[in-house]
Image: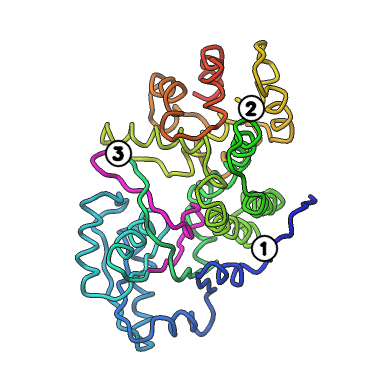
């Protein structure tokens, strides 16, 4: 695929990360020597949960064997939530340390970024799964008083990558990461559409950086489905680049659109019911299929509205939702909302309400602006519930 914008060196993720003030390092026989130099003289809090302690404990031991003062702390839950209680618990442990290293992916990374930001300390992450795109973002989603909100944080100082660990991660976690990246088809289109129809500011650099990373994943989709090294490498690069694209844009537009608003709506429903929350990328993957279907059906909408031809043109190169479903299904992910434990009424409410979550023009906003959802809701529910 050809691009008119001069590209950064996508293939060298270490150099690209350094440009944004982040040290990325692959495991070597010398056991992350640059990272060890970066933390020299510090006391390190190695943060795990009951799932990731199997990686964190030997990591802390390996640091200690090399003269690093490392303290292991395991949150006493298999799937902790980044809420006030958990953040306060970890913040108390951080008082004794100079640096927090999260051993995990989404939630632990979010907690470490938030508490170290507030404490004026640095943090890093040892990625245990290519499951989400928040590794390099400078914000963090938290649960406060039962609602999901986004708080300012800071980016991690270090990202440590061990492909033996990433490739051995549960397949559904790789599927969640794939869902988060395939969502970029939709959010990039949402952003471009808003730019063309509403005049919203648009960064060609950020969009192009994200699109190249997305294309690399599509080219390696077979390897991703097999959890092979090349595929996981492409997926992890794209997940990291998503954060860098957000830095360039100054917001989450390159990485989040209507599909994420659907995910956030459902997450708050799970919280209200006190139920287990499915992985972020699983919910985003479902939202991606809905967004793609909404774009594709614009051509069949009998009503005319301002910008219809523009939306139809943007929809043409998008993949079919069935292709996304086949990829996610191959990775063990649900492809219907009924499979994640939400009611049909909740999905209907989501279709009519989730666009209010963010003041951001997306395909969902367009449907409500021109009263198209009333004619689409039953069709979308029949297809995806």
Task: Decide if residue 230 is in sight here.
Answer: yes
Furthest toward the front, the residue is: 199
Q: CA distance from mark 1 to mark 3?
A: 36 Å
Say which label, 3 or 2, has the lower sequence index: 3
> Label 1, on which residue?
10
Residue range (magenta): 123-146
Say which label, 1 or 3, has the lower sequence index: 1
> Label 3, on which residue?
147
Question: Which of the two residues, 194 or 9, is positioned nearer the viewer here?
Answer: 194
**Marks 1 and 3: CB-CB under 8 Å?**
no
Task: Decide if residue 223 is in sight here.
Answer: no
Label 3: which secondary element = strand
Answer with left or right where residue 277 lies relative to residue 85.
right
Q: How is the image coloured?
A: rainbow
> Label 2, on which residue?
295
Furthest toward the right, the residue is: 2
Q: Is residue 4 magenta?
A: no
Label 1: which secondary element = loop
């Amino acid at each position: 695929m050809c691009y008119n914008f001069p590209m950064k060196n996508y293939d060298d993720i270490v150099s690209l990360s350094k440009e944004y003030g982040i040290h990325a390092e692959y495991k070597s026989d010398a056991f992350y020597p640059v990272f060890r130099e970066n933390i020299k003289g510090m006391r390190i809090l190695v943060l795990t949960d009951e799932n990731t302690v199997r990686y964190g404990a030997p990591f802390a031991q390996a640091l200690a064997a090399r003269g690093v003062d490392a303290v292991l702390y395991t949150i006493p839950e298999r799937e902790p939530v980044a809420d006030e209680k958990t953040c306060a618990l970890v913040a108390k442990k951080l008082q004794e340390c100079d640096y927090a290293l999260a051993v995990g992916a989404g939630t632990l990374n979010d907690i470490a970024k938030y508490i170290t930001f507030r404490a004026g300390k640095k943090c890093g992450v040892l990625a245990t799964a290519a499951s989400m795109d928040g590794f390099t973002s400078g914000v963090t989603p938290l649960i406060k008083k039962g609602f999901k909100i986004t708080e300012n944080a800071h980016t991690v100082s270090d990202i440590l990558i061990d492909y033996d660990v990433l490739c051995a991660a549960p397949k559904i976690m790789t599927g969640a990461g794939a869902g988060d990246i395939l969502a970029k088809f939709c959010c990039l289109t949402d952003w471009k559409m808003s730019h063309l129809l509403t005049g919203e500011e648009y960064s060609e650099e950020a969009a192009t950086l994200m699109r190249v990373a997305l294309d690399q994943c599509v080219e390696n989709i077979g390897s991703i489905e097999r959890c092979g090294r090349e595929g996981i490498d492409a997926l992890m690069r794209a997940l990291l680049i998503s954060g860098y694209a957000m830095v360039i844009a100054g917001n989450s537009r390159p990485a989040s659109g209507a599909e994420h608003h659907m995910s956030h709506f459902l997450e708050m429903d799970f919280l209200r019911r006190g139920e287990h929350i499915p992985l972020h990328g699983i919910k985003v993957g479902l939202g991606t299929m809905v967004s793609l279907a909404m774009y594709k059906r614009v051509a069949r909408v009998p009503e005319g509205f301002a910008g219809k031809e523009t939306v139809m043109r943007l929809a043409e190169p998008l993949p079919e939702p069935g292709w996304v479903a086949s990829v996610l299904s191959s990775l063990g992910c649900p492809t219907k909302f009924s499979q994640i434990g939400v009611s049909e009424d909740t999905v209907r409410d989501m279709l009519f309400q989730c666009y209010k979550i963010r003041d951001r023009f997306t395909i969902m906003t367009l449907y409500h602006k021109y009263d198209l959802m009333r004619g689409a809701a039953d069709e979308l529910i029949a297809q995806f519930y």
